[in-house]
Amino acid sequence: MPGPCLRHKGGSAKSSLKLTLRQMDEDAMASVNQELAGRYAAALFDLADDAKALDQVSADLATVNGLFNESPELSQLARSPLVKAEDRARAFAAVMDKAGVSKLVANFAQVVARNGRLFALPQIIRAFNDELSRRRGEIVAEVRVAAKLTAKQESRLLETLQAKHGKGVRLDVQIDPSIIGGMTIRLGSVQIDSSLATKLNKLSMALKSGVSGAAA
């Protein structure tokens, strides 16, 4: 009997170690991507500022971000190692042309694509908007939802947050299917989690606790 238990514990420890190492790799990659995004965003911000086009560029980036949120194929194009940088840049140029973004943003996106950094464009957009909000004294509300909000839903959410935290609130909406439904909101030190995933997790823990108590 002791044999299987020892093997089980060893297997659990090995699995736990693998998960820890994987998380460390993901955290390191996220840190690299964040630094990379910051550099590209700073360059774009300087270009937009010099051209007196911060509002136009911000609007164009919102359009591009919407394309990434709505099209899994675009995200796949940005990340696939099977697509050559030149082919990726050419395909993305067609997307930018169809979206009708400004020449400044289209050219910037081409540089990002040809440098093989298109996968980081959503983070670059976020970093650009964070700097713009900082310059304007805005507070960024980071919102995660399972599916795209309608314009009316975004407007109502913004009005609700502004009524409580002031007119300087800006929404940064990110689509995250893992939350299943509902949303999470982080606004400074305030965090609201009404996601279905969290509710199901709490229910699961409550059920396990009830079963354990009954067994005892």
Image (cartoon, grey):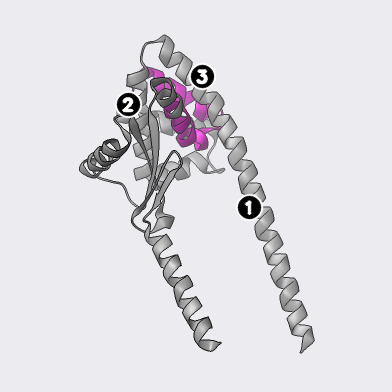
Which amino acid does the dot numbered 3 rest on?
A: Ala
Asked if one can make out residue 102 in the rendered structure from this viewpoint, the answer is no
Query: Which residues lie in the magenta part?
Result: 101-129
Counting from the top left corner in percent of width and height, residue 158 is at 28, 38
Residue 106 part of the magenta segment: yes
Q: Which residue is mark 3?
A: 43
Label disc, if present, on residue 175 of the rendered structure: none
In which image quadrant can residue 165 be found? Answer: top left
Q: Which residue is mark 1?
A: 23
Which amino acid does the dot numbered 2 rest on?
A: Ala
Q: CA distance from mark 2 to mark 1?
A: 34 Å
Q: Nearer the viewer, residue 106 or 140?
A: 140
Question: Circle 3 — which element?
Answer: helix
Q: Of callouts 3 and 2, which one flags the residue occurring earlier in the amino acid sequence?
A: 3
Which amino acid does the dot numbered 1 rest on?
A: Gln
Report crowding for label 1: few under 14, some 14 to 19, many 20 or more residues within 10 A (C-alpha): few
